[in-house]
Every structure is written in structure tokens, then in C-alpha cells.
Image (spheres, helix red, strand yellow):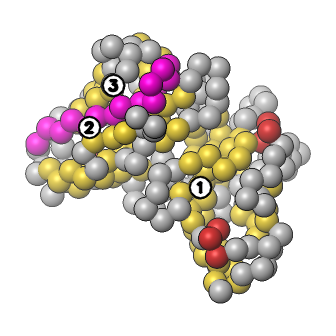
């Protein structure tokens, strides 16, 4: 595809439910980032992959959050036992090796009820 | 600490008026700064970066290390400039550290 693709676009989860958010980066992009954007805030860094290696997960807010990129392309962000404070837009971005420009997906809006 | 501050949540101007969106940063070392824009119902996209010293859609931004600022300017605002603008700083892992954003509203 032409850009970063995220699915689903919208997700409503009941509190306590597990969710999985998918990110399809631009083909060939080595770096992949996940961000969380709460209402009225800027995006906040969650985790970073270079190929299949998760090099930084310092932004994950709790051990309920888990991300993987097993083959170095598609990535999944999983949130276990969702809480209301997890409600946010989750953004994925990718960039090619040696380039600083990151391309963002449309995001997944998660609402926990 | 690495931090980006955008002091204005909302900036409202009339078409043709000058625009300045403020951004201040905190970073030890040589910072790499960006402006991202998000138009209504569109994805976040790069507007410009300080290392390119370019002008995009009439916008410019100059890095002022003395004042730790990277303000975004345009001499004559257009209605199509209405959007959310985010200032961002490149972190140590290549991740971006964003400000909270400024909503620019350009009135006819």
C-alpha cells in the first residue's frame, strides 16, 4: 500500500476485555513506532521496533500493554484487561533506515466502556 | 529532561493576517525539531524540519538555540491552514516527543 495502514479504525471494548491493534507499515520501512494520543494531548511514545527487534518499550504504561513485530513488518499492539484510562487514539508510524521522517497511520480510536 | 511545550491550545486569526505558533523545547545536546500538521479527518503529516531550512506552504521555522525555541511562522494565513499543529523533538531512539498541539483557526 501507499501508506501506513492501521486496523481497526475504531474499537469499542468493555472494561476488562483484551484488544489487539494492527499496524501495516510502509513496505521496506525498518523502523516502527507506536504512540498513544489521549484527547486534547499530543501523541506520546509507547514503543519502538527496528525490524523485528523491540529496542525501546519504555513508554508502555503498564504490563498490560504488549507489542510485537515477529517478521519485521506488520506489528500488533495488544492491551490486556482494558481500563477506561486506555481510551485513546493509538498511532503507528514507520520510517526507512537513515531517514528521520516518520509516516503516520490514520490511527485506531479505542473506547473502553 | 526532553520536553516540548506549545503554550497556546488555540490560535485564531483572520485570513491574510500573520501567524506565529510557539514552540519551546528542553534537550541537552543538538536538538532535531519538526512541525507536524493534522488537517481535519486526515493523518498526522510532516510539515517541515529544522535541518532542511525549507519553506512549506509558506510556513517557516527557525531554530533559536539561545531561546530554545522553534516557532512556526507564516506571513499571510489562508483558510486552508486551519488545522492542528504539533511541534516535535527527536528523542534518543529516533522516536518523536510531541507538544500538546495548537489548533489554528483561520477565519474568512
Pick the residue in front: A62 or A37: A37
Q: Nearer the viewer, residue B92 or A8?
A: A8
The numbered mark 1 sits on a residue in which chain?
B
Residue range highlighted in magenta: A17-36
Residue bearing the label numbered 1: B37
Residue at x 26% of width, y 37% of height = A21
User: In screen coordinates, is A113 left or right of B52?
Assistant: left
Query: Which label is found at residue A21?
Result: 2
Could you tell whether B60 is left or right of A94 in the image?
Answer: right
The answer to whether residue A32 is above or below residue A53 is: below
Discs 2/3, front: 3
**Image quadrant occupied by the C terminus of chain B:** bottom right
Kindly indicate whether the residues beneath marks 1 and 2 are on one polypeptide chain.
no
Q: Provide the residue designation for mark 3.
A: A74
Task: Classify mark 1: helix, strand or loop.
Answer: strand
Work out which residue is located at the far bottom of the displayed protein and give it.
B108
Which picture quadrant has residue B1? top right
* Image point (83%, 69%), residue name: B75
Q: What is the tally of numbered marks visible in this picture?
A: 3
**Is residue B39 visible to us here?**
yes
Q: Secondary structure at mark 2?
A: strand
Q: Give neighbour class at mark 3: few <14, some 14-19, many 20+ (Cα, 10 Å).
A: some
Instruction: Point out the residue furthest to the front here.
Output: A1
Q: Chain of mark 2?
A: A
Image x and y of residue A38, in percent: 39, 54
The spot of residue B23 in percent (x, y) is 71, 55
Amino acid at each position: 500500500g501507499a501508506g501506513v495502514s492501521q486496523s481497526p479504525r475504531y474499537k469499542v471494548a468493555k472494561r476488562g476485555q483484551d484488544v489487539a491493534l494492527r499496524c501495516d507499515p510502509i513496505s521496506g520501512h525498518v523502523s516502527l513506532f507506536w504512540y498513544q494520543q489521549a484527547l486534547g494531548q499530543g501523541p506520546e511514545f509507547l514503543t519502538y521496533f527496528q525490524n523485528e527487534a523491540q529496542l525501546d518499550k519504555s513508554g508502555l504504561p503498564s504490563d498490560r500493554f504488549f507489542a510485537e513485530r515477529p517478521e519485521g513488518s506488520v506489528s500488533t499492539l495488544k492491551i490486556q484487561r482494558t481500563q477506561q484510562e486506555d481510551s485513546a487514539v493509538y498511532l503507528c508510524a514507520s520510517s526507512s533506515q537513515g531517514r528521520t521522517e516518520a509516516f503516520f497511520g490514520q490511527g485506531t480510536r479505542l473506547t473502553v466502556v | 529532561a526532553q520536553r516540548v511545550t506549545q503554550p497556546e491550545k488555540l490560535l485564531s486569526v483572520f485570513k491574510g493576517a500573520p501567524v506565529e505558533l510557539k514552540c519551546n523545547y528542553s534537550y541537552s545536546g543538538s536538538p532535531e525539531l519538526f512541525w507536524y500538521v493534522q488537517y481535519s479527518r486526515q493523518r498526522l503529516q510532516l510539515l517541515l524540519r529544522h535541518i532542511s531550512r525549507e519553506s512549506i506552504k509558506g510556513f517557516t521555522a527557525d531554530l533559536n538555540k539561545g531561546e530554545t525555541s522553534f516557532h512556526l511562522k507564516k506571513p499571510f494565513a489562508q483558510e486552508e491552514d486551519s488545522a492542528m499543529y504539533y511541534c516535535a523533538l527527536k528523542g534518543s531512539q529516533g522516536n518523536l516527543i510531541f507538544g500538546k498541539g495548537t489548533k489554528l483557526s483561520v477565519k474568512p
